[in-house]
Image (cartoon, helix red, strand yellow):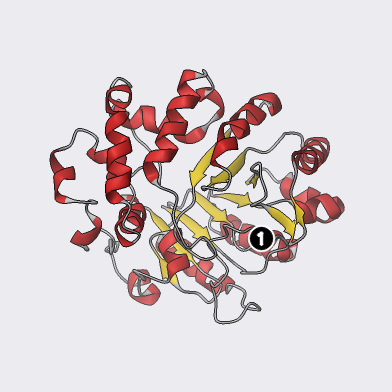
Amino acid sequence: MELIIKPTELCNFKCTFCSSPNLSSTRASVLDLKKIEEFLDRFPNTSNIIVNGGDPLMLSPDYYYKILDLIYERKMDTILSFTTNLWDFYLHPEKWTELFNHKQVGVGTSFNYGETRRISNKRAYTEEDFWKVSDLFLEKVGYRPDFISVINTENEHSAINNVRLAKAMGVECKLNYAVGSGRQSNPYTLSKIYKIYLQIIEEDLTDWEFNTKQIINKMRGSHTICPRSRNCDEHIRCLQPDGDYYSCGAYGDDKEYGIDFNSEMNSPRVSTPLQNDYELDSMKSECLTCPMFELCNGCRKTVKDMKVNNIVEEHCKLMKTMQSKLLELA
């Protein structure tokens, strides 16, 4: 099992695509550590606690040391994996360096070209800023963190530049398409990100982009990781600041398909709410006989996004133009 925690909605950035601006009833809400404790008791095989938000560095390091204490008390090998813009680390490295050097802590960050990732309403987060943050992290922690780039229609033209940057830094980036949640009211059409993944393969940049590797693995019948897995709600859970509980971080942002936390903590069964809704099975009935079924319908949140925004046919038309190249990956 993997647990995603969003301990706070607070963030020091103003990104235009943010999917998580309404996680809690009040922005002052902080996830009760008791919930994490109960989860670890119920799922002692938890391999990762993925921390995002909001930005997790808006809370004190003490909050995360308490989570590590819970892990230690249970003699677990669980990794505490941060996804953060690292801006507070850049401003106050002395505050975070010890925690980030902990053997059971991992850190990833975020960057993409364009105007969508913003330090403030008036200032974009630039490549120069990102290099400074990465350089300081390398100096203080000993490695450069991998990073996530969120792609939408505003920055799609520069998407592959993020992969070229990852190569220059010697790290791996993950190009995620924007889902239809929060400030990002319109999702990015799925087929357009596949077009970018094919460009990455053609430019021999696969080693520096996570999702492209997942696509190749899927086509070759190997194990893949969310959002390419249709059974992700069997092994992923998400806790929001108010303690709301979901089997998908994206649906958690939408406050849909929630799970009763107390019931699952006291049950031998694992809930699979996404698999119980047939409307999330596929974008359309014709998908069931299409050789690209898994590529288009691997994420049930995306299936709903494409349907709700009436872009299924747009997606399908472009996917068919790439079918031969995608099938050749097998």
Question: Where is 268 relative to 316, above or below?
Answer: below
Left or right of 137: which side holds 65? Answer: left
Q: Where is residue 16 in the image (x, y as percent from the top left)?
A: 61, 59
Other-residue count near label 1 (Cα within 10 Å), few / some / many at <14 / 14–19 / ≥20: many
Q: Name the residue under label 1.
A: 56
Question: Is any part of residue 330 visible from this angle?
Answer: no
Please state which of residues 97 and 205 is positioned toward the viewer in this rendering: 205
User: Does 320 appear above or below 307?
Assistant: above
Quadrant including the C terminus: top left
Inspect this view and state whether residue 52 appears. yes
- Please give left or right for residue 315 compared with residue 42 in the image: left
- Tag 1: amino acid: Pro
Image mark count: 1
Can you tell which quarter of the image residue 157 is in? top right
Q: Position of residue 131 (x, y in %)?
A: 78, 37
The residue that appears at 46% across and 22% down in the rendered structure is 201
